[in-house]
Each structure stands twice: as C-alpha cells, then as structure tokens.
Amino acid sequence: MKRTWLLGFGFFSISITWALYNGFVPFFLDNYLSSTALIGFMMTIDNYFALFLQPWIGSRSDKTDTRFGRRMPYLLFGMPLAAVFVILIPLHTSFVTLVLFMVLMNLAMSIYRSPTIALMPDLTPEAQRTKANGIINFMGGIAGILAYGVGSILYDADKSYPFIAAACITVICMAILYRTVNERRDSVVPIAEEKVKIRWRGELDRTTVMLLGAIFFWFVSYQGVEALFTLYGEHHLGLSESAAAFSLTFFSLFFVLFAIPSGWLGNRYGKKRTIMVGVCGLFLVFAVVPLVESLLLLRILLALGGIFWACININSYPFIVSTGEERSIGTRTGIYYLASSLAAISSPPLLGLVIDGFGYGSLFVCAAGGMLLALLFLSLVKHDGRTSGLPSSRNSKAV
C-alpha cells in the first residue's frame, strides 16, 4: 500500500497541472477571443495530442524494456519538458506565443501521461486495483484542491505564480517516482515478448466498445463543465475570476473525501453498479444547477457532484483494464484516454457553441443529457467489473 501512495505522486503532478490549465488558461484566451466556442476549441488542444500520441505511446510502453523499466523512460523525458512549458504559458506576450506554449506543454504531457497511469496496474494485483485507483485519485483530488484553492490565491498575487508552483511540483514528483519505483523488481505484469503483437482490434470486443461509449459520454459532460465553468461563474453568476475558480474546490474536495470509499464500493458491489449510481447522481446535479443562482447552493451541488464523480472516475479505469489481458495494460490505458480525449475534443467547443446561442444556463442542460447517454451505454455492458474478464495467460488474436 505504501507503494500505491508513492505511485500517486505521478497522478498528483498531472492533476495539479490540468486543474490549473483548465481553471486559468480560459482567462488568458478570453483576452484575445470573444467567442466562448472558440475558447472551448482552444482548450481542446491537449486532447488532439492525446488522441494520436497517448494510445501509441501506451502501446509502445507495453513493449519497452530498459534498465529503468518500461514506463519510467517516458516520465524522465516528458515531465521536465512539461514543467518548462507550464512556466512559459502565463509569460506569453501575444496570442501566438500563448498558443505555442500551450501546444508544447500538451505535447510534453502526452509523452508521459499514459505510462504514468499504467504504472498502477503494472505494480498492483488485479484484486487491489480499484482500491489503489481510489488512493491515486485521492492524491489527484488533493492536487485539484490545491490548484483551485491555493492556486486562486497565487493567481491574485501574480498570474504566473500558480504555474511556477505546478512546474516545481512536477519535477519533485518525478524525482520521488524515480527514487522509489523499481519496475523490474516490483512489477506483477511480465514485460511482453517482442514477438507478441497487441492489436487494437483484438481489444475492441462488445463489452469494451459499450464501456468506451459510456466513458465518452460521461467525459463529454465532465470535460465541458470543467473547461467552461469558470466562465460560467464569471458571466452567468457575476463571480470574480478567483471566486469562480475557488468554487470548483468544493467539487474537488468532496471527490477527494469519497475517492477511497468509492474504490471500496467498487470492490464490494462491482464497478458497474457503483458507476451507475454515480452517473445517475451526477445527472441530477447537472439538471438542477441551471435553476440555482445562490452561490451557497451552487457549491453544495458541486460538493455532491464531486461525490458522484468519484463513484464514476475511481472505478472506470480499473473497469476498462479488467475487461482485457494483463499484457495489454498500456494499450488499454491508451484506448481509455482515446475515448476521454475524443470527448474532451468535441465537448468544450460544442458546448461553447450552444452557450453562444442559448446562454450559459444551457451548459448544464447539455451536461445532464450527456450523463443520460452514458447511462444508456453502461446499461448494455454485461461485465460487472469485479474480476478480470479475460485470463491473462490466454493467447489473443486480432479480430
């Protein structure tokens, strides 16, 4: 269990960087762009890299074999680069330099994101992965609290301070992982033989496709709200930039508080059942938010949303891994991020376009609709997520 907490530093660094990026970069873009749809489109840059690079890098890391391990080389290369470009984002001098630094930062993060996440199932037996994912996401939630809470204070002092802090944390987390994680000694998944080819089509059975559909639609809802909420708070509720960002702290705080219990619930009652509770609950939260104008009630709803999102997010990645084979963990990690990236690419610009036409209240109406579609796809998944759907020793052939 100590190793799981140490692995959590990788996700901690990713989470704090993305939270700051989603919370404050829209304000930089708002200085240059008048359309919410265009701002939403610019906020999807990271997902274009994730769409093409993360599945390939995840699959490639399955077959990597170095003295540092199979995932660690990607961390050692990508994390320092990302730290540099994170610092440069608030130091932009024009729209062109802002976009350039955003692109370079997202390119660097795409190099190590899938390998970082794949470290958890690599080093954790299948029966313990949901609990381990709860711990890792607990640390990711702490990162979100720091990003929105402390980050908003630093942002008020100087717009560059939260980004400098995130860069320093990324480098520190890389050092912790390098010093404490020994893949060759601790891995429970053998390194794939070079002659064994892992084909994407062989991973896309009916259960996986239906589950990916559900993942896509709940991320359409979540990513759209996350990317555009600070603008919603500023333009619809009349909040200051820092107050709008701080409101997201309530979502992150209750996500953190319920992260580990969600992992326990997934193990006890099945990942699918726990996720369904989360999807239904988050649908109700999103459906009610447009009716609320009180800041107190909004933050209460965001707190409830954090609890329901924990039920979904803690169990979804172990669920997609459990339906495949051990030797394809990196590949299935890439497939998972392919689905979430497709959602993140399409969601902010589309929801931004709807906002341009119908106002900011429509943001949460669309988000509620996405949750209903996710529930439909999830109901078609027959696997309960309690045990691995395929024995790890079975030979696999492309369909």
Image (cartoon, rainbow, N blue to C red):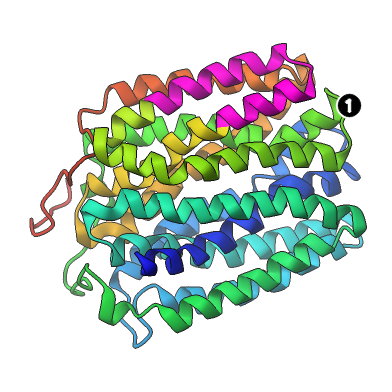
From the image, which quarter does the N terminus lie in? bottom left
Q: Residue 103's image quarter?
A: bottom right
Q: Residue 97's image quarter?
A: bottom right
Work out whether residue 21 can be spotted: no
Residue shown at the point (56%, 29%) measured from the top left: 305
Q: Residue furthest left?
A: 394
Instruction: Count neighbours of disc 1 (C-alpha within 10 A) and say few if under 14, some if 14 to 19, many if 20 or more.
Output: few
Q: Amino acid at mark 1?
A: Gly
Query: What's the magenta bit mostly, secondary-structure-wise?
Result: helix
23 is within the stretch colored magenta: no
289 is within the stretch colored magenta: yes
Rendering coords of residue 24 (x, y %): 78, 48
Rendering coords of residue 184 (x, y %): 28, 81
- Nearer to me, 364 or 294: 294
From the image, which quarter does the C terminus lie in? top left
Relative placement, left or right, of 262 versus 237 is: left
Q: Is residue 168 above or below residue 387?
A: below
Residue shown at the point (39%, 72%) measured from the top left: 71
Label 1 secondary element: loop
Work out whether residue 4 can be spotted: yes
Rendering coords of residue 68 (x, y %): 38, 84
Rendering coords of residue 116 (x, y %): 45, 65
User: Circle 1 is placed at which residue position?
Assistant: 238
Q: Is residue 28 above or below residue 233?
A: below
Q: Is residue 381 above or below residue 145?
A: above
Relative placement, left or right, of 51 versus 270 is: right
Residue shown at the point (78%, 28%) measured from the top left: 232
Q: Give the number of callouts.
A: 1
Q: Residue furthest top?
A: 291
Q: Residue 350's image quarter?
A: top right
Residue shown at the point (32%, 76%) measured from the top left: 64
Q: Which residues are magenta?
A: 277-305
